[in-house]
Image (cartoon, helix red, strand yellow):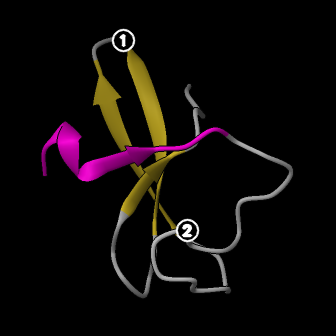
């Protein structure tokens, strides 16, 4: 998986519905290291698109 596979979104009040396919029951989580930063990314269980809403550790 490459970085261009990730869709970056601005976080609004809630992130529960997939903006790509409309799936309404939340997301799976994944983590990806980017240098010293660990990114917390979200995968839609229906269409499998990956989203970055800006959470980092």
Quadrant location of the C terminus?
Answer: top right
Q: Residues within 10 Å of mark 1 (few under 14, many from 20)?
A: few
Q: Which residue is mark 2?
A: 19
Q: Secondary structure at mark 1?
A: loop
Nearer-N-terminus badge (1/2): 2
Q: Is residue 47 above or below residue 31?
A: below
Front position in the image: 21 or 16: 21
Extent of the magenta region:
1-10
Residue visible at 42% across and 18% down? 37
Q: Residue 25's spot in the image, x, y percent?
A: 67, 86
14 horizontally vs 2: left or right: right
Tell me the residue at 56%/72% (across/down): 18
Q: Residue 22's image quarter?
A: bottom right
Disc assigned to residue 36: 1
On screen, residue 20 versus residue 25, left or right, reads: left
In this image, 44 relative to 5: left or right? right
Magenta residue check for 40: no
Residue placed farthest to the top in the image? 36
- In the image, what residue occupies the spot 63% across and 38% down? 10
């Amino acid at each position: 998986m490459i970085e261009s596979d990730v869709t970056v979104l601005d976080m609004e009040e809630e992130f529960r519905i997939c903006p790509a396919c409309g799936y309404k029951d939340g997301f799976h989580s994944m983590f990806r290291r980017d240098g010293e930063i660990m990114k917390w990314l979200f995968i839609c269980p229906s269409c499998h698109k990956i989203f970055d809403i800006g959470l980092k550790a």
